Image (tube, rainbow, N blue to C red):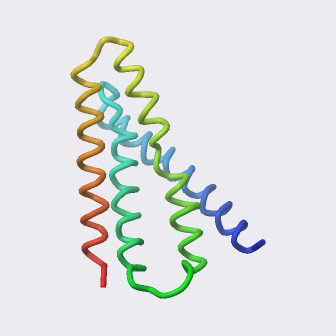
Amino acid sequence: MALDILLVALGGMLGGLGRAAVSTVVAERLGERLPWGTFAVNLTGSLALGLLAGSLAGEPGPAPPHALFLATGLLGSYTTVSTFSLQTLFLLREGAFGRALLNIAGSAALCIAAAAFGFALVAR
């Protein structure tokens, strides 16, 4: 149990650092008219989680320790659905309804597609 907690904590720390780095770099390059940094994090995180889930599909028994580190810790901290929600709310409050809708639809459709693609790439 203590090892599980340590793995999740370490993954969470690294995921948070990764989220900040990726989000910042993407926002600096593409601007912030749409929350591109958050979008990139959610898309790559969804792909990574799909790859992980697909690679574990069909494995008997409980999830291995590296799944706790990667899925719960690293990717749980890396993906930013709460940030996505707040940024979408800000777009709505600014009256940018079209951009808010694009952010919602684009994030949902492409992140689900990325997870499915990752799963399909490695599922047994």
User: Horizontal and vertical percent for residue 53?
Assistant: 40, 71
Residue plotted at (47% across, 44% down): 80
Location of residue 10 with respect to 92 vertically, above or below: below
Query: Which residue is depicted at the point 29% across and 42% down?
Result: 107
Point 30% across, 24% down: residue: 33
Residue 73 location in percent, x, y?
58, 61
**In the drawing, does residue 112 fall left or right of residue 12?**
left
**113 or 14, nearer to the observer:** 113
Quadrant in which the C terminus appears: bottom left
**Looking at the image, residue 121 lies above or below residue 111:** below
Q: Nearer the viewer, residue 62 or 41?
A: 62
Q: Residue furthest bottom?
A: 60
Q: Is residue 58 left or right of residue 30?
A: right
Q: Is residue 6 above or below residue 38?
A: below
Viewed as shown, does residue 48 lie left or right of 34? right
Residue 30 sits in which quadrant? Answer: top left
Residue most toward the front?
61
**Residue 90, image x, y percentages:** 41, 20
Which residue: 53% across, 67% down?
A: 70
